[in-house]
Image (cartoon, rainbow, N blue to C red):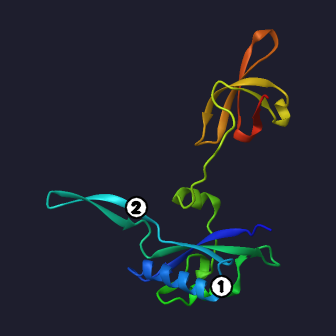
Amino acid sequence: MAQDTRWYVVHTYSGYENKVALNIEKMVENRGMQDQIQEVRVPTEWVTEIKDGKERQVERKVYPSYVLVKCAVRTDAGGRIKMSDSAWYVIRNTRGVTGFVGPDSKATPLTEEDIAAMGIERRSVELNYAVGDVVEITDPSFNGFIGTVEKIDLESKTVSVAVTGAFGRVSTFTLALNQVQPVS
């Protein structure tokens, strides 16, 4: 059974992000909690710094004083998503951790929109069709229509399909990527 996971943001003392991440990883390994706390990250980026007329690449923390932790979650009786008490305890009691980010410092998971905006997880899209391919529309409104892919927009996750209708008139439909399939 695949376990549901969520990302949480942990607040740390300034400059302790890497130490906190390392300590959490060590405790997870020592306690055998890899199924509960699956990943710990300190997001960084490479920037070009010009100092005294010299250019050099420097790695900087994207979110200073914060560490991201991916934990297995469950839904409680009230329908709220929660991490296990033992995972919460391990993270919260790690030296350098000041608390979780959320209302009243309660552990609140990031939303899918937050994850996408922060670039935490890159999701790749693999399509079995390309521009110019003949596809069948599977959307219930236009089910069975056959058309040609004119444009694929991965940013908005849409595909434009030109369908030749009655009397040779061409109509273009914009659909979700999963609403078309290649004609075999």
Q: Residue at x 69, y 37 (%)?
A: 128
Image depth: mark 2 or mark 1 in front: 1
Q: Is residue 144 above or below residue 36?
A: above
Q: Dot 2, crowdedness within 10 Å: few (<14), some or many (≥20)?
A: few
Question: How far across and down, in percent of the image, does residue 71 sit?
Answer: 65, 74
Question: How far across and down, in percent of the image, does residue 46 sit?
Answer: 36, 60
Could you say which disc has been placed on residue 118 in the image? none
**Is 158 on the left or on the right of 56, as rendered?**
right
Q: Dot 1, crowdedness within 10 Å: few (<14), some or many (≥20)?
A: few
Q: Is residue 150 above or below residue 78?
A: above
Could you say which disc has been placed on residue 32 in the image? 1
Q: Residue at x 83, y 78 (%)?
A: 77
Residue type for callout 1 = Gly
Could you say which disc has been placed on residue 45 in the image? 2
**Is 166 on the left or on the right of 130, as rendered?**
right
Of labels 2 and 1, earlier in sequence is 1
The Cα–Cα distance between marks 2 and 1, rounded to whole angstroms, is 31 Å
Q: Quadrant of residue 140?
A: top right
Q: Quadrant of residue 49?
A: bottom left
**Is 115 on the left or on the right of 149, as rendered?**
left
SS under mark 1: loop
